[in-house]
Image: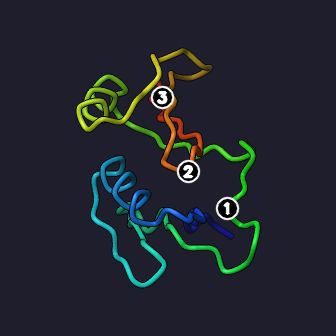
Amino acid sequence: MRYDGTMLMTEQLDACRDFYRDLLGVDAEAGAGWANFPLGDGTFVALHTPWRPGMTTTGGSQVLLLRVDSLAQESARLTALGIACSEPHEIPGGAVVTLSDPDSRTIQLIERT
């Protein structure tokens, strides 16, 4: 078994598609009710409108973790695009910044040392 991708449910497909395009720096493959962002290593982040009630309620229980080469560069790039990022803070093995998508999902960018 191996990891394939992450699907995020959203009622705000257009806003989230624009946000993740800017965050990931790639255009989405998209269709009616979905958008898929290939990450270049065979994995992906996908957005989808819900097909049953309750699929968009996260309650803060999920955090999307994305590894970056430089927190300083990514934070500056995202801030210039109007995406608010926290100050970096140290964690075991690296540092993280935290931000939120249009659905208030928590995203952490991680720079490993």
| Residue named by callout 3 | 112
Label 3 CA crowd tier, 10 Å (few <14, some 14–19, many 20+): some
The image quarter in which residue 11 lies: bottom right
Eyeballing the image, is 44 above or below 94?
below
Residue 30 appears at what percent x and percent y?
Answer: 37, 78
* N-terminal label among 3 and 2: 2
Q: Nearer the viewer, residue 86 or 10?
A: 10
Residue name at image x 39 percent, y 83 percent: 31
Residue 106 appears at what percent x and percent y?
Answer: 58, 40
- Disc 1 to disc 3, how far (Cα)? 31 Å
The type of residue carrying mark 1 is Thr
Residue 103's label in the rendered image is: 2
Residue name at image x 53 percent, y 35 percent: 108
Residue 6 appears at what percent x and percent y?
Answer: 57, 62
* N-terminal label among 1 and 3: 1
Residue 28 appears at what percent x and percent y?
Answer: 33, 69
The type of residue carrying mark 3 is Arg
Which of labels 1 and 3 is toward the front?
A: 1
Eyeballing the image, is 89 above or below 101?
above
Asked whether the beta carbons under mark 2 and mark 1 sit within 8 Å of each other, the answer is yes
69 left or right of 88 in image: left
The image quarter in which residue 63 lies: top right
Residue 92's label in the rendered image is: none
Eyeballing the image, is 74 above or below 23?
above
How many circles with numbers are drawn on the protein?
Answer: 3
Label 2 CA crowd tier, 10 Å (few <14, some 14–19, many 20+): some
- Disc 3 to disc 2, how far (Cα)? 27 Å
| Residue named by callout 1 | 56
Residue name at image x 66 percent, y 80 percent: 51
